Each structure stands twice: as structure tokens, then as C-alpha cells.
Amino acid sequence: MYVERLSLTDFRSYAQLDLELEPGPVVLVGPNGVGKTNVVEALGLMSTLSSHRVSSDAPLVRFGAEQAFVRAGFVRGAQRSQLELEINPGRANRSRINRGAPRRARELLGIARTVLFAPEDLALVKGDPSARRRFLDELLTVLIPRHAGTRADYERVLKQRNALLKSARTSRSRGNRAPDAHGATVESTLDVWDQHLATVGAQLLAARLELVERLRPHVATAYAQLTDGSKAARLA
């Protein structure tokens, strides 16, 4: 697979950028701050729907614009794919495949596959566990797109549960254990969210474990090529 065309509209520093590319290595050369990394970031977005630099969509949209567009043409053998990602901060992003009708952004997952190595990736070994979990989850959604739904469900339930915990702490500090309008206490509602979190969390954990198993031999081989072979690297 290679990228034959990339178009950016109101993405990062670009009001408009159109690149025609060919198979083989491509090197972007220029002074600091002209937007070379923005191009790489845009290509990564088409693959994973997330940025390796920021956790929200707002910084991806050029200052003064309301939305941004990333369009790319991918070639795999004799097959060509035209992909578009519409970035809407604060609202749902949308996608188009081969100029079709708008659809959910995550339907792009699995079509374009990229591998990105950036300075931020050193957090995989130097940073806290959240960086490693994020790496596994993003790789999962590329290899098995249906796990994008699993990940989204987990994050939604976790957010709801955390909000309820905050509400419970506030209620306890005020000495209030009264039921809500539906007759349920915060504690009983929390039990329901705990069950949801355990269910979807188990699905995500099982997927991560399976992925680690698939990565293990590749890590061992790569590490052996970098050393004299006297020590082994393992993933767990």
C-alpha cells in the first residue's frame, strides 16, 4: 500500500495543502515549524483516528476555522481507495469512503494501515502504563476494527462511573443518602455501572492479552537483531 494523494483543508497550520505522491520513500525537508509533522500526523489520523500529539480534536483545526478535512488516496495492488475524514471539535467526526455518503468516522478503521514512530513513542518504555495501554488499544482498532466499539464503550462507561463516584462523594460529604427521582440511591446505581465496567473491561483486557501474545515473537526477534543474543526481551 502507498499514498498517492493527500489533501488538507484547515488542518493544523494549513488552510489548504495538496500533495501528489509516488511509491517509494518520501522525505519532507524544511525548517522547523513549517508543518512537516502535521502531514505525518494527518496520515496517521486516517489509520487510527487519533493523533500521536494531542488527545482532543480541537488543536487539529486551524485557528479561526470550525472544522477540518483530511482526504487521502491509497493504492493497494490494483485497488484504489479515496478516504475523507471530517473533523468536528465538540461533535461527532464523520468519514466518506470513495466519495460515498457520510458515515461514522470509525468505519475508516482497517482500510489504511500505517506505522508511525515519533519521539513521543519513547513514552512506551519511559512513561507510565497509560501510554502502553493507549498504544495497544490503537493497534487493536487498526488490526480488528470492531474493537473500536469495545474501546468506546469502555471509555463511556468509565466516564459515567467516575461522574457517579464524584456525585457519591459530594452526597456523603453533605450527609445525603436520599434516593433520586427514580427511587435509586447513588450506591445502587453505582453497582449497575460497576457491572457494565467489569463486562466491557473484560472484553478489552482479553483483546489486549491476545494482542500481546501476537506481538511477543516479533519483539523477541527484533531485540535479538539489536543485541548479541545473550539476553531475551519479553512482553507481558
Image (cartoon, rainbow, N blue to C red):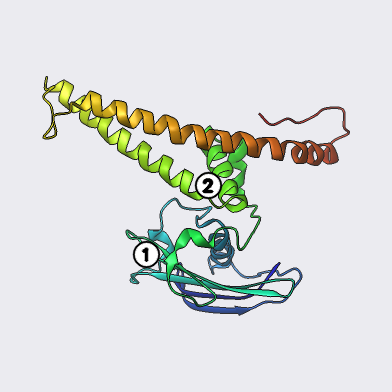
Residue at 47% x, 44% y is: 151
Q: Is residue 161 above or below residue 87?
A: above
The location of residue 132, given as percent across then percent down, is: 57, 38
Tell me where residue 133 sits by quadrant. Answer: top right
Q: For this rendering, which residue is in front, 134 or 54?
A: 134
SS under mark 1: loop
Tell me where residue 47 sits by quadrant. Answer: bottom right
Q: How many marks?
A: 2
Crowd band around label 1 with a 10 angstrom C-alpha radius: few (<14), some (14–19), many (20+): some
Tell me where residue 30 sits by quadrant. Answer: bottom right
The location of residue 178, given as percent across then percent down, is: 11, 24
Query: Which quarter of the rendered picture does the N terminus lie within?
Result: bottom right
User: In front of the other: label 1 or label 2?
Assistant: 2
The location of residue 230, given as percent across then percent down, is: 87, 27
- In three-dimensional space, the C-alpha distance between marks 1 and 2, rounded to whole angstroms, equals 22 Å
- Reading the image, the residue beneath label 1 is 88
Q: For this rendering, which residue is in front, 168 or 189?
A: 189
Is residue 82 found left or right of 101 in the rendered image? right
- Reading the image, the residue beneath label 2 is 147
Residue at 52% x, 37% y is: 204
Q: Is residue 83 above or below residue 217?
A: below
Q: Earlier in the sequence, mark 1 or mark 2?
A: 1
Is residue 19 found left or right of 220 in the rendered image? left
Residue at 46% x, 52% y is: 54
Q: Amino acid at mark 2?
A: His
Q: Amino acid at mark 1?
A: Asn
Residue at 11% x, 35% y is: 181
The location of residue 123, given as percent across then percent down, is: 58, 40
SS under mark 2: helix
Crowd band around label 2 with a 10 angstrom C-alpha radius: few (<14), some (14–19), many (20+): some
Q: Is residue 15 above or below residue 177?
A: below
